[in-house]
Image (tube, helix red, strand yellow):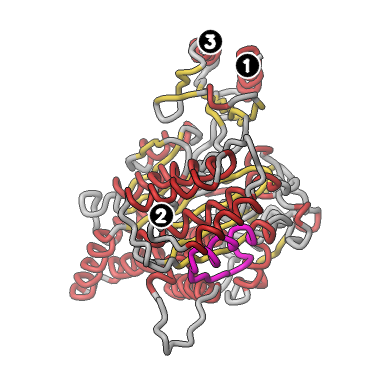
Amino acid sequence: MTAHQATEMQLQLLESLHTQVCKTKNYSYTYGTAGFRDKAAVLDTVMFTTGIIAALRSMSHNGKAVGVMITASHNPPLDNGVKIIEPDGSMLLQSWESHATQLANIAANDTVTQLIQYINEIVATLNIDSNVTPSIVVGMDSRESSPRLMDCLLSTLSPVFMAKIVNHNMLTTPQLHFLTAYQNNHEPSSDDKTVISVSQYDSKFQTAFKDLMNLYEIKDFNDCFESLVVDCANGIGAPQFQQFVKGLPQCNSIKFVNDDYTHPDTLNNSCGADFVKTQQRLPAGVDDSLLNDNNLYCSFDGDADRIVFYYVGNKTTKFHLLDGDKIATLFAKFLKKLLIKANLTQDDIRLGIVQTAYANGSSTTYVLDTLHCPASCTKTGVKHLHHEAQTAYDIGIYFEANGHGTILFSDNFYSKVQERQTIAIKENDLSSLKASKTLLAFSKVINQTVGDAIADLLGVVATLLISKMKPSQWDNEYTDLPNLLSKVIVPDRTVFKTTDQERKLTSPPALQPKMDLLINKIEQGRAFVRASGTEDAVRVYCEGKHADDVKQLSKDIEALIMSEVN
């Protein structure tokens, strides 16, 4: 929409909407790794500008569908946020994040003339055809503020850009990622009455899981655990997964806790993946009736893109966490065995794990020394892990320790496995044939667009059942070093700058040398500090051989930070 192409009506609409919606003045917004995220009360402005950016992004793709998800994931109920999804289901291209940030801050602090001028600059610089009609796929989580923020978003998309909008209303973040990609790959013709809905997601992953189970003639969970108990964080994952499991033969062995999504004030409250990971204890809702050392437990986060697993010890209530590191290593061991059985080498198909600095040191040692798989380390934020997994490996397994992750399978993976399958049929090599079929079937169980609690749950359960592995056996593959993750509220998180994939501070300049002195005092000590991506706080991660040392190290580093900022 250049100045000479924009209609007078469009300009008037933008000006009117800017006046009505953008009431947050002298406020700074940043589109980070999770999109925009803040208190819901100050997000009207970014919903208005996100509609503009999403429309422009779709137009730059010649009208392909772009997704917009309203969510704040694991954050408290009063927060909310929004992020944009690329036509292939991946996260917004990094070069567009700065456009989203700048446009939001112009709308919040400058005039509508400057807003239109910046829109025109984007259009001209990127050579966007203003005559293209944008297509937008939208969804939201179950927060109380989400419908209001959806109205702010749609206020721009419909009247100003005349966008084609598919509104899926409440659904999980990964479902919207999947459906955005699905719409671009299955655009119905004018005479096709197919309605694209979450049923396509359900059908795809239900079928993939059942096909994998049928390959091994598995009917139930009994070989590995009695029941699967799912903590839905009182979020949108509850109704979506409850509907999903109706299509699985094992649905009667799946129990739900914290599934009250209709009361948004309970969202992520003493439950959910983030609570379980950081507190390292059972969530609320798991009462005595559900405590069973033969059960497997898991927790989603508020929008169901993270998952962590856990179990209780032998006839005790001792808590054992199976986090993102454990999930990644479980998948790596399983898939490597299948590759060997299929007569495929690392030269044929490169399998590797991508981690962040938050990965437990024991997990990295296990990957390198026991599994003999390559491991990469990137900055925090799944967009960094996703890129590394996509470019470095044919089977790229990436998980943050918090349980956010997935597996990416390359074109070379499919080509080589299908080739081996053909050879196995000719040679009547039944073991190789079954391994090849399993690899292909397993890749369909995984949501390759983004980390997905539902798909990752299916992948973990399938791996355990096929491997005949109990949760305790999974856990005993390696023992985590004691670790502690804490948060320190600071006046300005931007002063904390890092290098070496966020493992070393460069600013404030005196802080890292002081930390090093403390770290070197404890056995197998490791610690780092980085700025939060979503709030004015810094995250402190500490690790060592002895739990008491780790607790003291964490307290000492927190004290250093407070003395630095005060």
Q: Earlier in the sequence, mark 2 or mark 1?
A: 2
- Residue at image mark 1: 565
- Residue at (54% x, 51% y) in the render: 49
Q: Is residue 364 magenta?
A: no
Q: Nearer the viewer, mark 2 or mark 1?
A: 2
- Mark seen at residue 3: 2
Dot 2, how many residues are within 10 Å of its Cα: few (below 14), some (14-19), or many (20+)? some
Tell me the quarter of the picture where residue 167 sits. bottom right
Q: Which residues are magenta?
A: 150-172
Q: Quadrant of the N terminus?
A: bottom left
Residue type at tag 2: Ala
Tell me if I can see residue 122 in this picture: yes
Amino acid, disc 1: Val
Q: Which residue is mark 3?
A: 514
Name which of mark 3 and mark 2 comes first in the sequence.
2
The crowding category of the residue bearing disc 3, from other C-alpha atoms within 10 Å (few below 14, some 14 to 19, many at least 20), is few
Query: Which quarter of the picture shows residue 251?
Result: bottom right
Quarter holding the C terminus is: top right
